[in-house]
Image (cartoon, grey):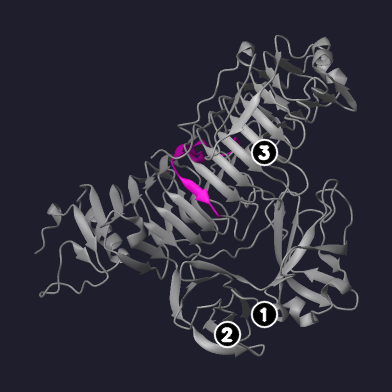
Amino acid sequence: MPDFCGITTIYVTKNFIGFKDGTSENVVGSIEEAVKRCVDLRKNGNYQPLTVKIASGEYSLNRELTFTPELFSVCFESLSGNADDVIISGAEKKSGKNSVFCGKKCLSVSLPKGVSDLFIGTKRVYPTRFPEKGCLNFAGAENEGSMFDDVSKWVKLYPKDVKELSEEDVENATLNFLHYWVDEHTAVESYEKTTGKLVMKEHSRYGIYGEKTEAVYYLTNVKKAFGQKGRWYSDEKEGRAYYMPVDGETADAPFYVPHLHRLIGIKGTPENKVKNLTFKNITFAYTRGDRQIFRGDGLPVASDGQAAASAGGAIEMEYAENCFITGCKFTRYGLYGVCVSEGCANIRISKSTFTDGGAGGIKVSGADFSGKEEARTHSVKISDCEITGCGKRYMAACGILIGHAYDNQITHNEIHDLYYSGISVGWVWGYKESVTKNNYIAYNKIYDIGKGVLSDMGGVYLLGEQQGTKVYNNLIYNVKAREYGGWAIYTDEGCSYVTVQNNVCYDCSENCFHQHYGKMNVVKNNLFARAGAELCRITRGEMHLSAVFENNALVADGSAVYGLPDEEFIKRGAVQTRSNAVCGKRSKDVTVISGDKKFSFSGAQELGLERDSVLAAAKFEIFYNGEAEVSGDGILKSGYVPIKLKSVGIRK
């Protein structure tokens, strides 16, 4: 009889066939069997900490692994200590076959209905696209109003733009359109080639035409476009995907067809949480990205309101405590990598990478202020992670999204190559009560985001009242919006009581710091440079103190330093600027733009701004790793303290 009381380590190897007597105390042939063995031990009163060591190989799951409170104090890790050696997959690995489609030699593979992700080896491959590059404009829409809620069920295409496409081509395609801060995706119900009228399966989430934006579109999974190298077409009637290989690819290339949206679900209850699980040095890969989205009133729509907020993750947690993910890799996944949801506390995600995600990297959100206290989520630490190359299907997703959660620490991460905000914190618009407080966002390196695709984004985006939140010592650069709103640090609607300190921000398509509206934010000892518009802007003036700017180094070089709502806003003291170093070649000409008026440095001082500030000649330098500094006579006289960036980003 096996001595189960003595087991502390269970080994998983795909080649295990059992001992001669058909039994084994601590070796199993699959991860599913390892989980079952751990549960059996717990049920039999064996509560010692357990480690599951997984031998090298790909482990494809038939269904998601679900962890409930009966499983606790278990560490799952790769046997070698190398995450690349163990892949937990949600896909079936298939062999392609040589085929002919649309008169072209190609490769094909069977594809279940509804699956719309495909990978070849370690490469995500994309459906055919029309036009192959760029986007087109709509000719009209059901609702041509400019308000957010002017949604449409149908749009019109210019017939000349799509004249080479048949009605069948369009009806079998997916319509993708970009506007505001979202990318919308919908199947097509019908298309009239003569009029250009296209009826969408879902309504648009927002109006096609807006005050600051007009949607542009492209089509994917277009049969007529088949032949583009590296792209594929899904023929749902045949249940096959046809792929046009790039040079060198042959039929023996491994196709991965994902069938799972989620690999691991950690599901406790308010009364009984899942505790003390660890995942270490494992790769999680190949999950599905298709999903349905509904507005609050139940209307099917083509996108979330913001940030792909309803998307799930490859790993999801609910009512979990003291769980850890460290040294792991999330790659080629369909939605977010990790979702930490209701009732979670003391979660750690560290030293992990998130690449090639359909949406974003990590999402955290629990109950809001009106929800039950036991469902609130707090004390999540995300550190030393790299999040890059995401937004492959849902470009509006964030690197890290914190919704309703408090006492979190987001530190020493490197976030880049995204289409939307790097770190987004808060999910309450305006001055309503919020649980999102006391968040520490520090020592992160955020760059190359936006990429000119979406609008209204920030390297760090903050929303709602957030007492105790601090944005400290981050390096943010190369933020580029499509139409408007490429900002490094963005305090959006109602953002209040936040400290923004010791950040270095430069090369933004608009402002380095932008506040929509809020209360009593302190912007202190930052280095802002090379903005496409004013370095700092407050859009809406209100009858209270909006922000204080002090001890900053503001390198204008041709741009205004501040953009403020109006002169009355300044005179009533709703913004305070003092002890700053105003630097740049033309700072003497324009320091403040207020409404349609422009004020020089001395003119701003006459209005009560820039008390004890100095005009300084400055040299702004950027180094090979993105670090930057400013030097020059008079800068330190303002009280500005040079910012040290050596500890920014992932710690080695």
Q: Is residue 519 above or below residue 49?
A: above
* 197 sits to left or right of 341: right
10 Å neighbourhood of mark 2: few (<14), some, or many (≥20)? many
Q: Amino acid at mark 3?
A: Asp
Q: Is residue 580 above or below residue 435?
A: above
What residue is disc 2 on? 106
What separation in Å lies between label 2 and label 3 (alpha carbons)?
A: 44 Å
Residue 380 within the magenta-colored segment of the rendering: yes
Q: Give the residue displayed 85% in from the left and 63% down from the top.
A: 138
What separation in Å lies between label 2 and label 1 (alpha carbons)?
A: 10 Å
Q: Amino acid at mark 2?
A: Cys
What residue is disc 1 on? 226
What residue is disc 3 on? 507
Q: In this picture, which residue range is highlighted in magenta?
A: 369-389
Whether residue 512 is visible to the viewer of this picture, yes or no, is no
Q: Earlier in the sequence, mark 2 or mark 1?
A: 2
Residue 97 within the magenta-colored segment of the rendering: no
Q: Are marks 2 and 1 in contact (CB under 8 Å)?
A: yes
Looking at the picture, how far across and down is residue 618, in whole percent? 66, 23
Q: Quadrant of the N terminus?
A: bottom left
